[in-house]
Every structure is written in C-alpha cells, then in structure tokens.
Amino acid sequence: MKRFLILSLAAISVLVSCKKEIAQVPEGYGAKEFVKPTTPFEPDKSFKKVAYFPAYRSIKDIDTTSLDGLTHVIFSFLKPKIDGTLVLDASKENVKNVVSLVKRHGCKIVIALNGDNKIYTTLISNVQTRKLLIDNIVSYALENQFDGVDMDWEYPNASKGNDVTFGIFMKELSVELHSWHRTLSMAVTAGVYAGAIRDGINQEAIDACDFVNLMAYDGAGYKSNPDHSPYSLAEEVLDVWLTQKNLPKEKAVLGLPTYGKGKETPTSAEKSMPFKDLLNGGADMDGSSFAMGGTTYYYNGKTLIENKTILAKTRANGIMFWELGQDGHGDKSLIKVALAKFKTL
C-alpha cells in the first residue's frame, strides 16, 4: 500500500563554508508527498568511505573539500525522548543546509541516533512504543531528505535483555527503511572485551544492517598500550567482529580517529585533542604521539592511516572517521590521506 508523508514547502537556504559555497536544495524539497517505491531495495556492496559530522559542529569548522571522495556523511545525533518523539543535538547549522552541502559533493547523507539507555530499553521492549519510534525515525529521515539511518546506541546490554529487543527493533526498522530505499547502519563497540556489551549486538541486528561501523578507537590501556587506536587494535577488532560475531566482510567498516587521546598522569582523566589542534601545536603529520600542555596525546598519523586503509581494503569493506570537525584541513587532512591511498589499491 502506498504511504504518503506531508512535507511543508521549504525555502532555499544559503550556507557559508570555508569556501563560501552556495548550497543547492536537494531534489524533493518542496514536494507535498512521498510515494513509497514499488521496486525492490538493492543493497550497495561497494567500499564505504564514511565520516561523521556532529550537529554541534558548524560547516565553517570543516574543510568541505574533504567531502569529495566520501560515500557517506553521518550527521549526528538525533535522540529519542521517552514519548518516542525525536530531538536533534543543538545544531549550529540548519539541517537542510548540511543535507544540501553533503549532496552537493555527491555523498549520501545519513542521520545518526544515540541517546539515553533507559529510554531505548523502555521504548524498544514494547510493541506499540517500538513501532512509534520506528515510524518517527523513518518519517524524520524522509522529511529531511536523509538517505539512511545509523544507530549509535552506546550500548545495548545483553544483561538487560537488550540483545533480543535491539535485534527485533533493528530488523523492523530495516524492513521499513528498505521499503523506502533508505539504508540502515550501526556503530558498535570495538568488542575486544568479552561481556554483556559485546553480546548486546546479536546476529539479527547484524543481519538487519547494510554496513556496520567498528569503533576501533578509545582503547587506551588495552594490553597495557597507552595508544587508544594502534594498528594492533584495528586487527583485533576485525578478528572479533568477522569471526566471533559473524559480521560479513562486505558489511565491515573500520573506524579511524581524527583526534588524539592521552592522560596527564596515569591516574588522571583521559583527555581528547583534535588532530588539527595537535598539528597547530607542532605535532608531526606522520607522528603517533605528541606532548602538549602536560599531556602526551596518542594519535593516528599519515602512515598509520594509510596502513589501516590497506587493512580495511583487505579485510573489510570500508573506512569510517570520527569526525570531520577534528580533522586537519587541506593537505593536512587524514581523511584525504586515506582517500588518496585507497585510489592506489
């Protein structure tokens, strides 16, 4: 049965990026209705080149030329409220401006969801509220011209029964999104520690996704390594998800950081520093650690990003960056380093 969603008339917005680009309104804005496609959904099995764009960033914070060559930009985050309605993180830009910019550069634009564990647990455990949440997510994606949805719940917990309900939720959300020719992806824990968090993602959830973003970072201290995202961690993350978790290679997208992390002392809280700020402070583009303000930050430099890109091409089917606003600009961009390396493979 055909399903119609009413959209209000939208005006053309003008945005300013680092290159003062004029946004073009995506096709479909101003339409009064959407008609559900009658043709089958065709999965995209090509190599994914993904970067997150947090809603709290401004377009002027990023080098928009980094978008060239990416396949997907994931705008984050949309959050559910306890009544099933959705609210976007405070955004410096109009959503339509971001969608317009990304589509202008030939990328797919995806909306990511995260939020409160208790809210998700409550909403997806009940048939009626789960359907309400799914309907609201799909409506938001359609009305705002998003090409897909990315679930970034950190994290479903098997000890709370989330593995079962999350799997059901993802399957039902996938069916509805695919019926509109929209994709479903999810971001997941590195998974190197056994337990309820890793077990919170079951096979049903994996099967529902078009691709899975593996967060192979923020692992400082694993096997006594102070580096939060070494090459060895990327290898182990792929080992876990491809073998133990039965994630198909064509769905695996390896996550890479555009930031460094470190501690001032062994007992102090961990600090994060954008890669561009590390460079501005004097860090080597091809380095791996840099001391600044009393803290030694560990980061991925040019060679490591290139090697991880080779690893992703060999053992997975994509690379993902967190996130655009922390990357360097111009020839100092880690995203551009990865894209250039991929062209040679």
Image: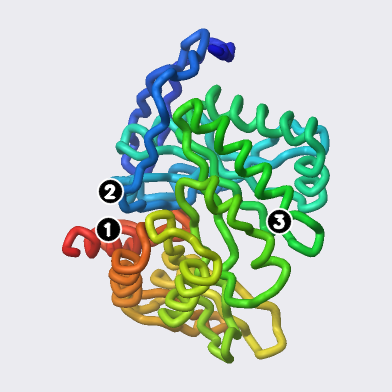
Residue 236 percent coordinates (x, y): 48, 78
Which comes sooner in the sequence, label 2 or label 1? Answer: 2
Q: Residue 109 vs residue 83: left or right?
A: left
Which disc number belongs to residue 54? none
Residue lying at 47% horizontally and 11% vertically, measured from the top left: 31
Mark 2 and mark 3 in contact? Answer it, CB < 8 Å. no
Mark 3 and mark 1 in contact? Answer it, CB < 8 Å. no
- Foreground mark, 3 or 1, reads 3
Residue 80 percent coordinates (x, y): 72, 39
The amino acid pointed to by label 1 is: Leu
Residue lying at 58% horizontally and 76% vertically, measured from the top left: 192
Placement of the C terminus among the 4 image quadrants: bottom left
Residue 169 at least partly seen = yes
Mark 1 crowdedness (10 Å alpha carbons): few <14, some 14-19, many ≥20: many
In the picture of the structure, the residue carrying the numbered disc 2 is 69
- Closer-to-camera residue (50/250): 250
SS under mark 1: helix
The amino acid pointed to by label 3 is: Asp
Which comes sooner in the sequence, label 2 or label 3? Answer: 2
Mark 2 and mark 1 in contact? Answer it, CB < 8 Å. yes
The relative height of residue 123 versus residue 237 in the rendered view (above or below) is: above
Mark 3 crowdedness (10 Å alpha carbons): few <14, some 14-19, many ≥20: many
Image quadrant in which you'd find residue 200: bottom right
In the picture of the structure, the residue carrying the numbered disc 3 is 163
The amino acid pointed to by label 2 is: Gly
In the picture of the structure, the residue carrying the numbered disc 1 is 339
SS under mark 3: helix
